Amino acid sequence: MELFEEQKILQEIASGKIEAFEQLFIVYQPKLLSFLTGLTHDKEISRDMAQDLFVSLWNNRKRLNHIQSFSPYLFRMARYTVYDYFDHLVVSQKYTNEYLKENSEFISEEEKLFVRELQEIINITVSNMSPQQSRIYRMSREDGLSNGEIATILGISKRTVENHLTAALSILRKVIYLLLISLSS
Amino acid sequence: MRNHERIKQLIGLYFGKKFSLNTCILFGRWLIAEDGKVPKSKVLEEIWRQTSTKSTKETSRDWMELQNRIKPKPSVLHSLRWIKYAAAIGLIITIGATIWITGRTPVSPTIKMAEIFVPYGDSQSIILPDSSEIMLNAGSLLVYPVSFENSLSRTVYLTGEASFSVRKNPEKPFIVETNHMSVRVLGTIFTVKSYPGDTCTTATLEEGSVLVKVKETDIEAVILKPEQQLVYSHKSNSINIMNIDIELFQLKKTGYLIFENSSFNELMIALERKFNVTIQYNSQKHAGDYYNIKFSPEESLEDALRVLEQLIGIHFKIDKKTVIIN
């Protein structure tokens, strides 16, 4: 969409013209849908997400008056939507660990390659932590030791263990290292 | 390798594939982790810029649906349970697409359409402006013109199952459009069944005559005689016409669930529709078995499942709107 034309359309939408909104939808919804589907690997859910996003665009249409360029704006909304989606997905799938072990042999080579790469990236992240942090992190997540046990082994207070772990986890928030190991082994 | 390059490579390996849910979750965990938020977002933005997709029929369908959401009109829409509604609305493609193809600045169609959606576990009858009567079965969507006055025909769009009792009017044929089939009525009582996800579309005639045309095929249009049923199989792209027991068929219309030589799968789908529940079961377990069963209208879901318990030896558990069978 030409920039000038886009500005005009955005202003028309802000003033409540539904035909203008339709034009915007026709141009951007397919792009949004491909982007969301590319990341969620689930077309139906992505469709619902895209629809919700456009509903919210329409409900907050006054804001479009102040937007210079629509595409980056839509991208930011899409990105939040994706983060939000994964946030919920991660929380809702507590039993992934066992399921994963059972099913790991059925996945494609392409998928295995991806998982190996992902693990490597996380390895790098862990190795970039301070030595003490990464050690405590590994003891906790790989060896499954409790904070009390780690404190005894390293001869530090339990509180210090907790502090280190919190720091390590804030770096790796929600990435559970063990899951990856069980998949690739 | 630089961090940015690594992230780019990783997201590249993932984007647009169809991985297992678990792998998607792992990716999600990594993506939303605090570490490297900025480079991750940069890579996503690059992908965003490179993603360009043209609008399709689906886009116009989605627009139609969106329009309904953002300007709620006084329609007879019953329930907006999205997923099912979205599935049911597939048919509107036809309407939407026509508007696009003509290339006019998209305006609302000149013929005002109304729609009625009957959720699972329900059925409803309506009377059209020409006083034809339609009985809509569970999980069905019907789109019809508010008035037939300015049109040459009386065309309605159906997803799901409906029985029609059509007022005779030789000047304005009555047409039922579904995804796969179009049924042209020559004054009469008949039923069309076309649920999304079903493997076949069915037209059954009780009285009068109808002309049935399967869309986008070479199959010639067929005139059905009373007490005949035409089944179009989507998979084999073929039709089968058989004489049916019309009394049995009419019983079904009054709320009986009747299965003759039906698979376990068909049984479950019908129960899901009638009682608006989700049934979880192992579809392999009963594959190849066929059943003859009749449930009367007053039988509850539990009654029906008890019958199956006795008959087939299933075990079931009802938890609100979900039934688990093993």
Image (cartoon, rainbow, N blue to C red):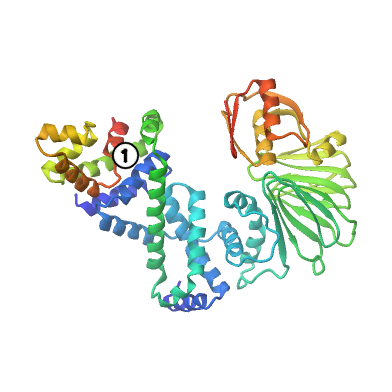
- What is the quadrant of residue B286 in the picture? top right
Write the residue at 51% across / 75% down.
A13
Write the residue at 71% across / 49% down.
B215
**Does residue A21 lie above or below B125 as drawn?**
below
In-image side of A68 versus B77 (left or right): left
Q: Is there any visible trace of residue A11 in the rendered image?
A: yes
Q: Residue furthest left?
A: A155
Quarter that holds the C terminus of chain B: top right
Comparing B119 with B195, the one in front is B119
Write the residue at 49% across / 50% down.
A45
Mark 1 belongs to which subunit?
A
Residue B297: where, in percent of width, then height? 78, 37
Q: How many marks?
A: 1
Residue B149: where, in percent of width, then height? 82, 68
The residue that mark 1 highlights is A115
Residue A134: where, in percent of width, then height? 16, 41
Residue A42: where, in percent of width, then height? 47, 47
Write the residue at 80% across / 45% down.
B191
